[in-house]
Image (spheres, rainbow, N blue to C red):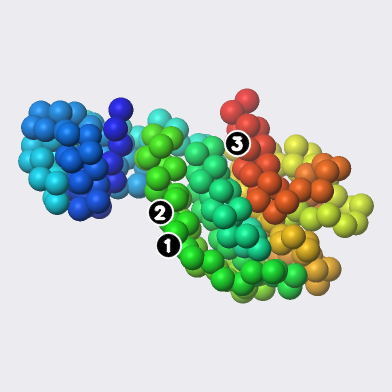
């Protein structure tokens, strides 16, 4: 099964961009009549047939539309501090998309060792991971934003059926994900930098309705903690 991205699947035909067309026609040698799958990343998966195998603008005919078979029953938003080594955050984005995530926001914190991140690179990795795992929903990758601004942009308290969870290392007033999260709820999860969140940031998050969470006794790297949260919440929703 070969999955390609297109801008629009609402009509009877869809057009692949130059990069996707080149991969379809030149690399995979798809020709007239060959069947492929296409999506615009909006959650709809389409079975299609190549009708014009142009390696610059390959056109396909839509034969069937169906909802993303891997669509999860909840919305997962991870806000994570960029890692000092950008490759580690890139690794997280790739694996998180393969497992299942809807939105990733790089957040700049008081103890952040890195304050910039090439989101175009992350978006390309997210697209590649979506196609690799045969999903039809492309996660949103936000531009880096200060944690304080991220928190201010949220509603004062969690909306109905939403869990807000902040993971950090210090203090004892914390519970596990399994204790605080109810399967089926949407989730916003905060993951701090290598130096952890500052106490000021924790207090601000708590006033915004976030609940303090521990991810166990081991001290985890930022990207490991983020992937742990993605994996655990997806697993809890599969039961």
First along the sequence among labels 3 and 1:
1
The residue singled out by tag 2 in the image is: 124
Looking at the image, do the residues carrying marks 1 and 2 touch, with CB atoms under 8 Å apart?
yes
Residue at 54% across / 42% down in the picture? Answer: 95
Separation (CA) of disc 2 from disc 3: 23 Å
Residue carrying label 1: 120
Where is 165 relative to 82, above or below?
Answer: above
**Is disc 2 surrounded by few (<14), some (14 to 19) or many (20+) residues within 10 Å?**
few
Q: Where is residue 81 in the image (x, y as percent from the top left)?
A: 65, 62
Residue 200 percent location from the top left of the image: 81, 72
Q: In which quarter of the image is the N terminus?
A: top left
Query: Can residue 174 be seen from the camera position used here?
Result: yes
Query: 110 or 185: nearer the eye?
Result: 110
Where disc 1 sits, the SS reads helix
Q: In this view, does 136 lie to the left or right of 197?
A: left
- Label 3 to label 1, Cα distance in Å? 26 Å
- Label at residue 234: 3
Q: What element carries label 3?
A: helix
- Residue placed at 11% from the left, 33% from the top? 31
Nearest to viewer (mark 3 / mark 1) = 1
Q: How far apart are marks 1 and 2 (CA)?
A: 6 Å
Q: Which of marks 2 and 3 is in front?
A: 2
The tag earlier along the polypeptide, 2 or 3, is 2
Q: In which quarter of the image is residue 171?
A: bottom right
- Residue at x-position 65% and y-position 51%: 223
């Amino acid at each position: 099964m070969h999955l390609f991205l297109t801008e629009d699947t609402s009509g009877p035909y869809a057009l692949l961009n130059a990069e996707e067309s080149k991969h379809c026609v030149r690399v995979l040698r798809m020709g007239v009549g060959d069947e492929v799958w296409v999506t615009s990343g909006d959650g709809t998966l389409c079975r299609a047939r190549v009708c014009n195998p142009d390696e610059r603008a390959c056109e396909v005919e839509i034969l069937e539309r169906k909802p993303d078979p891997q669509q999860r029953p909840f919305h997962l938003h991870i806000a994570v501090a960029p890692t000092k080594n950008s490759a580690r955050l890139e690794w997280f984005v790739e694996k998180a998309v393969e497992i299942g995530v809807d939105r990733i926001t790089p957040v700049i914190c008081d103890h952040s060792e890195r304050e910039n991140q090439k989101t175009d690179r992350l978006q390309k990795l997210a697209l590649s991971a979506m196609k690799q795992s045969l999903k039809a929903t492309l996660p949103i990758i936000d531009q880096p934003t200060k944690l304080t601004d991220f928190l201010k942009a949220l509603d004062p308290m969690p909306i109905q059926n939403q869990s807000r969870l902040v993971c950090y290392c210090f203090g004892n007033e914390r519970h596990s994900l399994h204790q605080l999260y109810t399967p089926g709820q949407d989730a916003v999860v905060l993951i701090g930098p290598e130096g952890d969140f500052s106490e000021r940031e924790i207090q601000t998050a708590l006033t915004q309705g976030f609940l303090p969470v521990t991810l166990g006794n081991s001290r985890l790297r930022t990207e490991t903690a983020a992937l742990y949260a993605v994996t655990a919440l997806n697993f809890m929703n599969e039961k």
